[in-house]
Amino acid sequence: MNEKFKFEKSQKITFILLIVVGLLSLTAGILIYKDHPEKIWSNILLNNYYFLAIALCGIFFVAVHKIADSGWQASLIRIPESFASYIPIAAILMFLIYFGMHDIYHWTHTESLDHILQGKTAYLNMPFFFIRMFIYFALWILVSYGLRRLSIKSDFENDNKHFNKSRTYAALFVVLFAITSSTMSWDWLLSIDAHWYSTMFGWYIFSGALVTSIAAITLIILYLRKKGYMQYITESHLHDLGKYLFGFSIMWAYLWFVQFLFIWYANIQEETVYFVQRLEHFPILFYANVIINLVLPFFVLMSRGSKMKTSILATIAAIILIGHWIDLYLVIMPGSVGNSASVGFLEIGLSIGYAGLFLYVIFNSLTKASLVPVNHPFLEESLHYET
Amino acid sequence: MYVSPIREPLIKGEKSYQTITDEISAPIAGKPGPLWYAGITFSTLALLVGLYAMGHTVWNGIGTWGANRTINWGWGITNFVWWVGIGHAGTFISAILLLFRQKWRTSINRAAEAMTIFAVICAALFPVLHLGRPWLAFFMAPYPSTRELWINFNSPLIWDVFAISTYFTVSLLFWYIGLIPDLGTIRDRVTSKGKKAFYKFMSFGWTGSAKHWQRHESISLILAGLAAPLVLSVHSIVSMDFATSLIPGWHTTIFPPYFVSGAIFSGFAMVLTLMIITRRTLNLQQYITVNHIESMNKIIIATGSIVGVAYITELFMSWYSGNIYEQYTFLNRATGPYWWAYWIMMTCNVISPQLLWFKKLRRNLTFTFILSIFINIGMWFERFVIVVTSLHRDFLPSSWSMYYPSITEVGIFIGTFGIFFTLFLLFIRFFPVIAISEVKSVLKSSSEKFIKK
């Protein structure tokens, strides 16, 4: 049952090429937008957040299934587990925004804050911001690496000792992420529009990240299957991944819509300003966001057959990945870059570069252990699984 | 289907299909014990108290309640939201847990669904009584021809009417459709003529033929599909009664998911309260095992923690907003004249469920029972805090006020307990408390007898 993944040279070259594309667009961007450093930094922030959230939600996927005694996913769990290896890279990249704080975050200009923002300085100040960031990353890396280490260890010792211990780690991660999934979105995203607030914001961002992460997991699995690996992943597993994509897309839309509805209905200026700006200056992306992230997955994944069909599932997963990039774009850019923000070579190129980096790290990490957790107590359930 | 050996069995003891039928239908065939008679007497008395109080309200008007101009929603709406919340566990168990293929739901779904329906009945009474003129309740129907008036479709109160009546209808149908095969089984077992006629009528001529089963399965699937979004929609819309307003403490975007999770939280607490007693009195310990209790406790801690995160988010955002009215509202909740309600809510809903992280406590029946009562109380206070403390400090300090419930309101609240428990006691007397046919479906995969083999 032991199945080793081999990171081929051609794959390595492809991913490095993608990274080069990213670096080239970044360099070109720096040269062209000399007077608009906020554009560069906002793009870096967007990609930092996007890929970090995919990695974290992958670990969340592992942790939740573990404490829920779930059986069906045991055979595919090495894929999301490997996402842990991206978190340290994401930490380095995220700390880079130290140099762009003034360009992204209005509240860092402490010399010219109005009384509302002055009232927020107890939370929104540079030292505390970076202390929090350090704590988040330290804890995430600690727990996610612990989960992965125990999982790989169990391949060599056939008892449930490591599995039982990893349940404690899983519970810890769920608790940790219950809090940090909200606070990270407040720190890095909500504070861009420093005056604006919404209690739903953290959960709305989390739900989008979760569905993005499941789309990424699905796509990687489908790719590996096409390459001849993981042949034990059957239509039934794909069916379940498809159900997740379907269900969490609806959940995202529910949270997105409710946040919009309440602010629209109450019509308080301090709150509506956020949506007014996005509707007036980014109408195409605003509506595309809902269509791509709700309408398409809803109708495409409605039927049982389409969830099981590789080509349809792969297409819709790719579309969801783009859709939630747009969602994040709409969260970040109007606040940090302003109404002139647009999607051009920098936005697309830099994201391609990040995708290359992410895939390189993940694939490299997949070679480190068997693709099958051979001693997982629920592995047999997963291998004989039928929906 | 392969089942991992580390999974605990869901059915204990040496059970065959025959013993399952015998044991679950035993309470229907036999005579009820003195405990049942005591229970039904007590709850009918409570019901009568409630009926009197309701009559008093309708005859004399809403002035008999403690509501005033500032706090125009008091106990009535608190009780309404509390009961609707309790009515969430049943559908969650039968629809959402079905989607997540949780086999343990088969032992508790029937009773939980019954409880859901009774709780929604109790809930629906409050807004109707609060109308003051309940005979005009039909004004809420979108039927303009006689009055040449449409209802106000912009009002979340009207959305509520649609949401709850849809929820009630689907839950009732789902529950009843699930009952039909079991009623057929009971019909074939009872001997007295009257009973036979009753169950014959109730089971719609069920014969258990392959065609019947096939149709039964497909309608169940459709209803489960309909019920799943309803679990989310009902309490989301209940939260909109508050959140679409401008009142600090009510207008907050997190309300829908937080209300839904709170509703499932309180629903499971009520299921635990009832099932821990029921399994003992009806001798169903081998079907509703400690494993089942533990699974429910896991849901309690998950939903309770989500509610906790929501409380803290609200608290943080009220400060972060920089809006002095928001800040005052939350400060006042925690330290104002209703501080005790706030801290009862925090202790019961956020702090006490955290004890369930210990496996020993999750599997301890006495502890679980006490905790479930705590949560029932805590969730009532949550709604009280939301409704009353947000209103009692009006925008004008001259309108500030306090809320004191009248004896009539207390009577109505007691009355809803009477309705709830009377219906529940009748249910366990005349219907199988556990879904016989569904439990049989997991016998081969999850019973102690077959796992050992």
Image (spheres, rainbow, N blue to C red):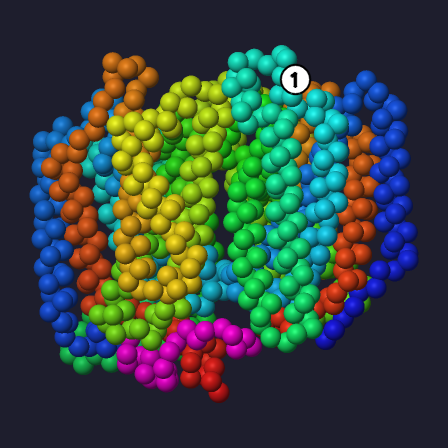
Magenta residue span? B1-24
Q: Quadrant of residue B39?
A: bottom left
Q: Which residue is mark 1?
A: A109
Near-viewer residue (A210 or B352): B352
Q: Position of residue B321 (x, y in %)?
A: 49, 24
Q: Position of residue B246 (x, y in %)?
A: 40, 23
Q: Residue at x 27, y 25 (%)?
A: B392
Residue extending furthest bottom? B453
Name the image quarter holding the N terminus of chain B: bottom right
For mark 1, does the 10 Å Cα neighbourhood hold few (<14), some (14 to 19), or many (20 or more) residues? few
Query: Circle 1 sits in a helix, a strand or a loop, which is it?
Result: loop
Q: Quadrant of residue B384?
A: top left
Q: Is residue B17 visible?
A: yes
Q: Position of residue A121 (x, y in %)?
A: 56, 22
Q: Is residue A296 visible?
A: no
Q: Residue at x 43, y 75 (%)?
A: B9
Near-viewer residue (B370 or B119): B370
Q: Is residue A295 above or below residue B225?
A: above
Q: Position of residue A284 (x, y in %)?
A: 68, 29
By secondary structure, the bulk of the magenta-drawn segment is best described as: loop
Q: Residue at x 13, y 34 (%)?
A: B406
**In-image side of A137 versus A348 (left or right):** left
Q: Is residue A122 above or below residue B129?
A: above
Q: Which amino acid lies under the numbered mark 1 shown in the image of this protein?
A: His
Please tell me whether residue B9 belongs to the stretch shown in magenta: yes
Q: On what subunit does the disc labeled 1 rest? A: A
Q: Quadrant of residue B42?
A: bottom left
Q: Is residue B317 above or below residue A316?
A: above
